[in-house]
Image (tube, helix red, strand yellow):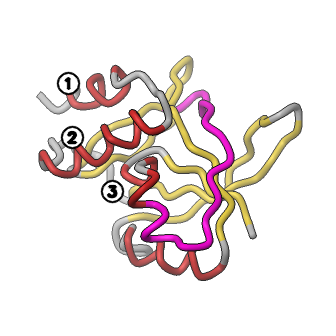
Amino acid sequence: MKYYFAYGSNLNLFEMKNRCKDSIYLASTFLYDYELIFNKFLTIIPSKNSKVPIGIFKISENDELNLDIYEEYPSLYKKEIIKLNFNKEIIEGLIYIMNDFNKLEKPSKSYFNRCLEGYKNLNFDKIYLLDALKKCN
């Protein structure tokens, strides 16, 4: 099992469990010095003094393969391993980041609502999603 950091539609606990049967939700926290943007789907970009709500999961190898398919890896998203301070220790986790994020494009209503449901599941303020949506105007 390895750590996986989710920030978009995979925060939706129902969908995440359907997609990744072995996954275990551990906690919610923030990833600092990144911000959310939409390019049809969510991605993150480096941004000083910003933060992104994330869910921390433990996933199996099979879960990762299912995430690779869902995230259209390697064509749409790339995989990175990032470090995060969690419970007074540094952990390393897998995160998917869009390959081409040089344009801002609004998401479909259904995708946005799936992300919004995930924010509700983990008690995150929807302002982060709304701010990312405003950048698309």
Residue 104, label in figure: 2
Q: CA distance from mark 2 to mark 3?
A: 10 Å
The one nearer the camera, 55 or 84, is 55
Q: How many numbered discs sit on the rendered protein?
A: 3
Q: Which numbered tag is attached to residue 7?
A: none
Towards the viewer: 124 or 64: 124
Residues at marks 3 and 1, CA–CA distance in whole angstroms: 19 Å
Instruction: Write down the region rendered in magenta.
Output: 16-34
Q: Identify the mark at residue 134; answer none if there is no mark.
A: 1
Q: Whole-percent x and y of residue 108?
A: 13, 49
The residue beneath circle 3 is 100
Residue under the point 44% across and 71% down: 19
Q: Give the structural element (helix, strand or loop) at label 1.
A: helix
Q: Position of residue 82 (x, y in %)?
A: 68, 50
Label 3 crowd bin: few (<14), some (14–19), many (20+), radius 10 Å: few
Q: Amino acid at mark 3?
A: Asp
Q: Residue 103 is drawn in which quadrant? A: top left
Q: Quadrant of the N terminus?
A: bottom right
First-in-chain label (3 vs 1): 3
Circle 3 or circle 1, nearest the eye: 1
- The answer to whether 75 appears left or right of 57 in the picture is left
Q: Residue at x 27, y 51 (%)?
A: 41
Residue 131, image quadrant: top left
Q: Is residue 133 above or below residue 43?
A: above
**Amino acid on which the number 1 mark rests in the picture:** Lys
* Front residue of this view, candidates 59 and 37: 59
